[in-house]
Image (cartoon, rainbow, N blue to C red):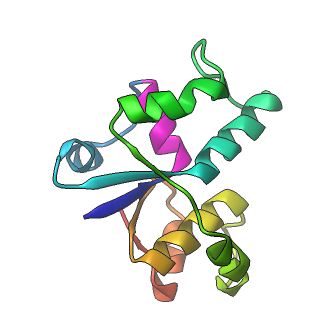
Amino acid sequence: MNFVIDTHIFLWMFTNSKRINAEKLDILKNPQNNILLTNLSFWEIAIKYNIGKIKLKGETPDNLPNIAKELDLEIINIDAQIMANSYQLSPVEKHKDPFDRMLIWFCIQNNYTFMSNDDKLHEYEKQGLKWI
């Protein structure tokens, strides 16, 4: 099965955080699953690193693509057409994060399951989002 991980899941994997629950860890460790990380996550991290919103345990964003590969994540690019069509994702009242919205739209368009700890995502289920 194909799972696209939210940016915070990648950061938690990289920092060995205990915030990833057992169900998600089982999915991440199962070799039959394809764990996908989009190029958008690197941009999000770089922006937040630049403005001081996140720290990377002595790393810089430059090293993160290599770290993702070491974690056996498949890095995939979001197609320009999907980005252009993303306006079709209807807004939901309590969720405005533009990075998440693009990842959600990408997952819906590709029939991928989105892995996130964001509890507001259930509002996107009626638009076709599968998530855990």
Point 67% across, 87% down: residue:
88
Q: With respect to residue 54, does 1 lie above or below? A: below
- Indicate whether residue 14 is drawn in magenta: yes
> For the magenta stretch, what is the residue range?
6-15
65 or 101, which lies in front? 65
Percent x, y of residue 14: 45, 28
Residue 24, image x, y percentages: 29, 48
Q: Is residue 57 magenta?
A: no
Q: Number of numbered discs present?
A: 0
Q: Quadrant of the N terminus?
A: bottom left
Q: Main secondary structure of the magenta part?
A: helix
Toward the right, the furthest residue is: 51
Towards the viewer: 17 or 63:
63
Residue 97 visible at all: no
Q: Is residue 78 left or right of residue 32?
A: right
**Residue under the point 68% across and 45% down:** 44
